[in-house]
Image (spheres, helix red, strand yellow):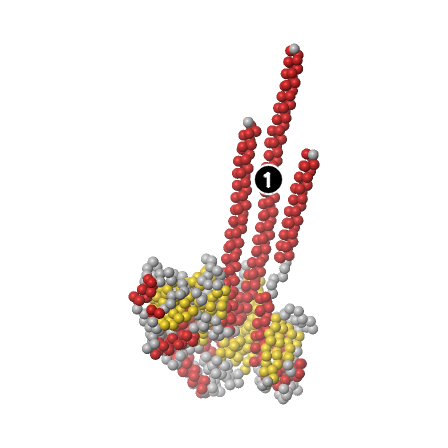
Amino acid sequence: MSSHKTQTKIKFCKKYKRINKTIANMIFRNTHKSQVKMFETIGVLIIFFILLSIGISVYFMLQKSSYAKDTEQRRQLQAFSTVQKMLYMPELDCINVFGAVEENCADKIKIKVFNTILQNSDTQNDYYQTFGLSNVTIKIVYPTQEEYKIYERAPKKYVRAFKTQSPILLKDPKNPVNEQHLFGYIEITSYVQE
Amino acid sequence: MAINNKKAFEVEFHWIFILIAGAAILAFFFVMAEKQKTISQEKLSLELSTQFDAAFISAIQSKGTTQTMPLPSEGIEINCGKTQLCDCKYTVLGRPTSFGDKIIFAPNKLDDYEAQIKTFDWTAPFRATNFLFMTTTKIKYVIVYSDTDAPIRELEIQLLKDLPATLKLQTTTDISKIVYDEDKIRLVFLTNPDPTLLNTILSANKRKDINAVYINKQNNEATFYNKKQNSNSFEQTTLKFLADSTSADSVNNALMYATIFAEDPHLYECQSKEAYKKLSYIAMIIHERAKELSSQMQDKPQCATLYPIQTGQTLDNLKKSAQQASNDLNTAGNILPLAQQLQTQNKELLTTSCPVIY
Amino acid sequence: MCKNNHNKKSQMEIVGLALIVVLVGLVLLFAVQYTFKKPQQTIQKAKEKTTAENFLSAMLKTNTLCQKRTIGELIQDCALARMMDCGNSQDSCLNAKTTIQYLLENTIKKWNKQYRFIIDGAENTNSLHFESSTTACKGEKASATRPFTITAGFDVTIKLDIC
């Protein structure tokens, strides 16, 4: 009888052990599983942030390149606007025999005089808003070849320079009856400091 | 029990984890949005600056026509700062940009989908510069004149001829007939207004933005009426402008028209001073040109007598008066007789087939 | 059965990862394409058009060495009767030709731009046709066209293409 009890006890203990082991195994697996799940989630998030960072870097790189292109276009446009403004500046415009302003024309004497007054640093500072960091030259092409520097303000250090030109008529007002028009062009060398 | 405890903790931990991760992601996108906003603001400001230049050049090339320029939805603010220093700029989304070499007369705020731009040559007596007049269709201009006063009636006709056709305009001789159908109204008085009447108008239309200017062409001065802060009354500022009321018309009405478009007297003062500075430079150039021409007049003795003594002295005085006016607007009146003198001398040169001064 | 489910799950994950790699690859492709795309030429075209217009406007009023006549007057004479004697056995057509060619070569060509200049509407002015090269401005170009009156009722069109 005691052996039966013992046998049952042993069986029960074994069973209990088995059950305990199973439960123990279950607990172990569950804990391990949630740890794995957590690491998995962290891993996914890390990958996600890496991809997001790549995406954002690419986006900002594109933005930077687009901004650089816009800035370059704006510089070109500004230089061209300055050239166009010069065609209508009262500091350079031509007057015909009847006292009317001639379009797209610069007076030769006014060019020389304008250059002289721009030697004054205060005057040059006032005209900085118009011409900026640039050299402005008017070149006569036909029938004579002459060059007049109007404004010079090149920086000591610059990354690059680009030129903008526009044809213009020039007039020598010496003889109002036999007005002679010469062909030339305005050239602006704009400097980029970066 | 251990399992239960861990399970309970796991859920909370999970939620905390989600919150932290979510906050990190939101922070990321928030930073990106802020950076994007700054870049857009800069781009907008640069674009506007380019558009200004382009509109200015088109307006000069197509004289007399009104150009339109698209505005950002937030509008642009225009002012010259609050101090004596003339720091004139337009502001877009909080980002200020200087006027540069342009002389602009405009209201304090342009709040519409597009601005109307018109350039006007300023001659005194030669063309000194171009003014840029800006406004929008949301601002109504009311010209109050008198039928009985002939010069004032003439001025009203002149205004109607020269002001942009796209301007929202009402002309009236009776102040009670003004229709307040826009949020922003600028009253242009050609006769001296009664200040009490103006205050009454202000009290009756508290929701409207009303300001006024009285143009006294006889004395060449303009009185700006701007609403005082937190009050139903106007503060007055009187400034001089240069114009020629005689038939000579040696100085045109550009500075007078500028008083209509410029709401802020400080803006008007700053931009007028810029104009006088420009005038002094042009006078200098024309003077030097006249000197150069005179040295080449040996074969034309009739011209040699006119250059440079008469014209040279007038031009030199004009240059000095313009320089003075660029510091003090009250001295601008000294320019008028010199401009008239120069105009007469120029006509004489034209009739004697001598090279003209301007 | 458990093992099968596990395999299917990992396969799904691999597919997911592969999808992400493909998406990233596509994004990078677009980015590279965008970065190396040539910028819009609208502003350049507008500048060239204005340059062409200014050239024509200035050229027609320029005084030449032929009796101090303007190029416009030489073109008028060339289109009509060719009565002008410019010296050195040159008539108005030849003088206009050499002058216009000189102007184009010392401005537009010097600025490294291609050009094409023609005058349409008069037989006599057919010689006033200039190109920087035989293939100049066959594609995209900026043009300035200007009607020019030879005499009452007789107009020609002067066209300058810059590219």
Question: In the rendered view, would you say B5 is above or below B270?
Answer: above
- Note whether residue A125 is visible: no
User: Residue A190 occupies which quadrant of the picture?
Assistant: bottom right
Neighbour class for label 1 at 10 Å: few (<14), some, many (≥20)? some
In the image, residue B135 lies at what x, y percent?
Answer: 44, 67
Chain letter for mark 1: A
Question: In the rendered view, would you say C27 is above or below A133?
Answer: above
Residue at 66% in and 49% down: C22
Q: Nearer the viewer, residue A133 or B223?
A: B223
In the image, residue B249 lies at what x, y percent?
Answer: 40, 79
Q: Could you tell me which quadrant the N terminus of chain B lies in? A: top right
Q: Give the left or right position of residue B248, taking residue A48 as reference.
A: left
User: Residue C102 occupies which quadrant of the picture?
Assistant: bottom right
Give the number of marks.
1
In the rendered image, the residue lying farthest to the top is A1
Residue position marked by numbered label 1 in the rendering: A41
Q: Nearer the viewer, residue A193 or A90?
A: A90
In the image, residue A29 lies at what x, y percent?
Answer: 62, 31
Residue at 66% in and 71% down: C137
Q: Nearer the viewer, residue B232 or A90?
A: B232
Q: Nearer the viewer, residue A60 or A137?
A: A60
Q: Residue type at mark 1: give it.
A: Thr
Q: Give the left or right position of residue B134, taking residue C40 as reference.
A: left
- Note whether residue B137 is visible: yes
Q: Give the left or right position of residue A143, taking residue B245 as reference.
A: right
Residue at 66% in and 73% down: C132
Disc 1 on helix, strand or loop? helix
In the image, residue C104 lies at what x, y percent?
Answer: 62, 75
